[in-house]
Image (cartoon, grey):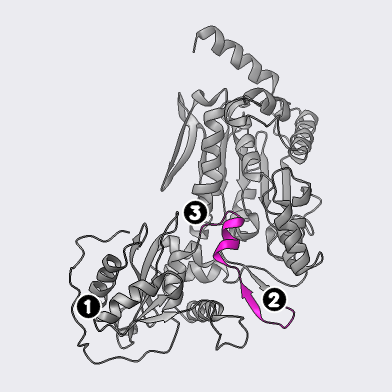
Amino acid sequence: MSSEFEAMLADDMGRFFYDPLGFVMYAFEWGAGELDGFDGPDEWQKEFLTDWGEAIRTNNFDGVKPVEAYRCATSSGHGIGKSALTAWVILYIMSTRPFCKGVVTANTSEQLRTKTWGELGKWKKRCITGHWFEYNNGKGNMNIYHVDHMESWRCDGQTCREENSESFAGLHAANSSPFYIFDEASAVPDKIWEVAEGGLTDGEPFWFAFGNPTRNTGRFRECFRKFKHRWRRKQIDSRLAKMTNKELIEEWRNDYGEDSDFFKVRVRGLFPSASDLQFIPQSYADAGMSRKLEHSQYGFAPKIIGVDPAYSGSDEACIYLRQGLYSRLLGSYPKTDDDVKFAQVVAAIEDEHKADAVFIDFGYGTGIHSVGKSWGRKWQLVSFAGESKDPAMLNKRGEMWNAMKSWLNEGGSIDDQQTADEIVAPEYKVKLDGKIVLESKDDMKRRGVPSPNRADALALTFAFPVVKNKPSKAIPAPIRPVRRGR
């Protein structure tokens, strides 16, 4: 870029200091390339950016005297384009406010890396000022910073586990804008909200909270209730957004009703009337990750292996071991379309760990099971859609997940952060007969949440009661795999 162009671009960014919508219209090549067919933001996004610009003009920050923090909480249905808006917010602040500092978080590390921060990467490439900044999206290394001011002009992606709360302490941008963005804010722990408050005391602070209103308790809920006098509040119905699947929304309305909690949360952007929709609380997964067990605490229990195969797409095949309160991810693999090859992997793992039982998901596991049966392996198929022995749950998958939930509450340990993220991802609905329906993998994918393959593999270890067996007389695995994915 020529120095003349850079000088002009810097002047233009100064012109947009009070105009977020003007920046978004200017910074991206609407109607061309990847944005062919798009003439600009959706109407609700335009309103959001316009209201923010009016508040910026009212505060009229002079670069010296601190102004009142701009707080905006947005509860919405699914699929409205909040990840794109989040990217625009970050790029606008970074481009128009030299030496700003920001922190962005989400309910899980996977949500943060693949959705929130991943979306930022896409829009940074499209942005006219994108070359001003370096962008990273590695594990433990999510940041964007000015190429000439790495430490003093930047924004970082941080997980929202409570032990990371110090990352949300004062950002110290007295002559610029400190800012926070909470994505899927319903699941961000209250401790993180409390620490972030301390970062709003200097400069021109901004704080944005976005999310589906999945919980009727917690700080995100209180933005619309107890603390509503401090927050600008927006509620976006998915039916009013351009990009949402209107046919699917109509199916949901017919199936669950306009006033059901499911429809309120997923479409209308309203908080549930009865209770939280998250099936396993975040606190259960965090506690499971923090536990370190001695062998004496679980060595007496049978060893159970759960196998969740995958044949295509982005899903991974996973194998989990559980022994009492102990669990361990033994392997994850891109797909398992070769039944014999994957059966060899399962058999080798069974022999290595002297497992007392192996449970395999019926969906894609029938071929693997047949191969194992020919070798004398007593593997069991488990149908997720099968009958539940738990009277509270609709099907076998719900029964297993409910058992896993109780196990975590009673002291179960998890060794893998992605598993912990997946455990808290599914939501649930209650049928008219009172049965609890755990959200399906397909429904999770429709709302942009990855399939919980690792968590399903762990859940499979709760399929049936198991006792310790005598040594197996099964045929050893024909080929021991050289390496195992992880």
Cα–Cα gap, marks 1 and 2: 41 Å
Helix, strand or loop at mark 1: helix
- Identify whether 119 is placed above or below 214: above
Q: Quarter of the image containing the C terminus?
A: bottom left
Can you give x and y, in whole percent of width and height, for residue 439 in the image?
Answer: 60, 68
Identify the amino acid type marked 1.
Answer: Asp
Residue 173: in sight, yes or no?
yes
Q: Earlier in the sequence, mark 3 or mark 1?
A: 3
Left or right of 361 on screen, residue 122: right
Can you give x and y, in whole percent of width and height, for residue 296 in the image?
Answer: 30, 84
Can you give x and y, in whole percent of width and height, for residue 134 in the image?
Answer: 46, 30
Identify the amino acid type marked 3.
Answer: Glu
Q: In the depicted view, which residue is nearer to us: 150 or 329? A: 329
Q: Which mark is residue 110?
A: 3
- For image coordinates 61% across by 82% down, the residue present is 393
Give the extent of the magenta segment.
431-450
Identify the amino acid type marked 2.
Answer: Val
Residue behind mark 2: 430
Helix, strand or loop at mark 2: strand
- Identify whether 151 is placed above or below 344: above
- For image coordinates 68% across by 26% down, the residue present is 23
Cα–Cα gap, marks 2 and 3: 27 Å
- For image coordinates 65% across by 37% down, the residue present is 202
Q: Which mark is residue 351?
A: 1
Snapshot quadrant of residue 288: bottom left
